[in-house]
Amino acid sequence: MAQSILVPAAETAAQPVKPLFPFLDLKAQFETIRTEVMDAITETMDSQRFILGPEVEQLEKEIADYVGCKFAVACASGSDALLLALMALGVKAGDEVITTPFTFVATAGSIARLGAKPIFVDIDPATYNLDVKHVAAAITENTRAIIPVHLYGLPAEMGAIAELAKHYGIAVIEDAAQALGAVYHGTKAGNLGTMGCFSFFPSKNLGAAGDGGMVTTNYAALADRLRLLRVHGSRRKYHCELLGVNSRLDALQAAILRVKLRHLESWTVARRNNANRYRSLLINVHDGVVLPIEPDNMRHVYNQFVIRVQQRDEMRAHLLKVGIPTEIYYPEPLHLQPAFAYLDYTPGDFPHAEVASRQVLALPIYPELSQAQQACVADAIAQFQPAIVQ
């Protein structure tokens, strides 16, 4: 293993030290494409066309082509993408939508905002994605859709989910916010269900300089409805056909995203290379570390590289003291959060999600992360001494 560059213990005993490197280094990425991005921004500023327009239309076409579907409709955020997809299906109060409790709040929040009821199903502890074995039992006459989340960049088990949806006549909305470029049995995320929803939040593999989102679909009628919903339900000025929202992607964001999209595949390869390097570095370094899996016929794009550690909080504190940045996605499952207390779930209802929330720890994985930095992470993990549980 590479020589450790960790801060000596004597310098870290009193308080955490400044991180040796960022958890996510957006500045490093920007430096590699600065000229391209600034040229695109200048061109957009010169045009003075800022809301939707040609840049957004071109991005929609390029994302559709990249995902392999017929249509892509841009919107203001990944959260709005989920909301618009549900609105396009006509989901309303009294309807039910099945999803996972182990994800970002926007997934279930988009359901609840329409007055529909989120129905949670536990996760597969190996993949952190919706456990298909439990989905059928959650389907009722009120179920309108299933929202599987391709968590951390790994596709959910979409074959079985699609079969269930077809059998019961319900829609599938992919929450692919973290999974642009992920592949399931030869098909990319966003082209595996009725609609796919993406986020361009800056930390995503394809990140904007702010918020942004996209909905993909192969259904022309849904694409048309999505376009209508994102502009207050109006096709022509001051004439409202239905109640929509204001959720338009800015042309400046589209111009930046179009530049970045040209580099996405190389960044994905770099993330995957970093994931493989972590596996080599960590496979025998600590008995208590469980590495992420990548099932056959899937391509994980590693928006996050997440390990499991039984004494997660203690390990994280140790890493912080020696300057290694980490994050937790997610420390509290949705069914136990105050915003969803009205659903009357209780601790123990979804045990795999609850255990995962206490054990997951994300390591830096961005494309520009160096081999030396990864070796530093592995060295720090190797030095962790877990407490002996009596």
Image (cartoon, rainbow, N blue to C red):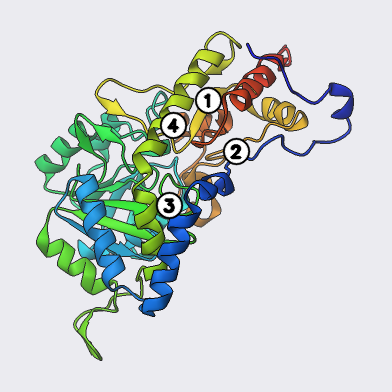
The residue wearing badge 3 is 343
Q: Is residue 376 above or below residue 42?
A: above
Q: Earlier in the sequence, mark 1 or mark 2?
A: 1
The residue wearing badge 4 is 270
Q: Are marks 1 and 2 in contact (CB under 8 Å)?
A: no
Q: Earlier in the sequence, mark 2 or mark 4?
A: 4
Q: Is residue 291 left or right of residue 245?
A: right
- Of the residues shown, which amino acid type is indicated by label 4? Ala
Q: Is residue 252 above or below residue 152?
A: below
Q: CA distance from mark 3 to mark 4?
A: 42 Å
Q: CA distance from mark 1 to mark 2?
A: 11 Å
Characterize the local packing of mark 3: few (<14), some (14-19) or many (20 or more) Cα atoms within 10 angstroms: some
Q: Is residue 305 above or below residue 343?
A: above
- Of the residues shown, which amino acid type is indicated by label 1? Ile
The residue mark sitting in front, 1 or 3, is 1
Characterize the local packing of mark 4: few (<14), some (14-19) or many (20 or more) Cα atoms within 10 angstroms: some
Q: Tell me where residue 153 sits by quadrant.
A: top left
What secondary structure is found at the residue carrying circle 4? helix
Q: Position of residue 258 (x, y in %)?
A: 34, 56
Q: Earlier in the sequence, mark 1 or mark 3?
A: 1
What secondary structure is found at the residue carrying circle 1? strand
The residue wearing badge 2 is 327
In front: 248, or 103? 248
- Of the residues shown, which amino acid type is indicated by label 3? Leu
What secondary structure is found at the residue carrying circle 2? loop
Q: Earlier in the sequence, mark 3 or mark 4?
A: 4
Mark identifier at residue 307? 1
Q: Is residue 15 left or right of residue 76?
A: right
Q: CA distance from mark 4 to mark 1?
A: 19 Å
Characterize the local packing of mark 2: few (<14), some (14-19) or many (20 or more) Cα atoms within 10 angstroms: some
- Of the residues shown, which amino acid type is indicated by label 2? Glu
Residue 65 at least partly seen: yes
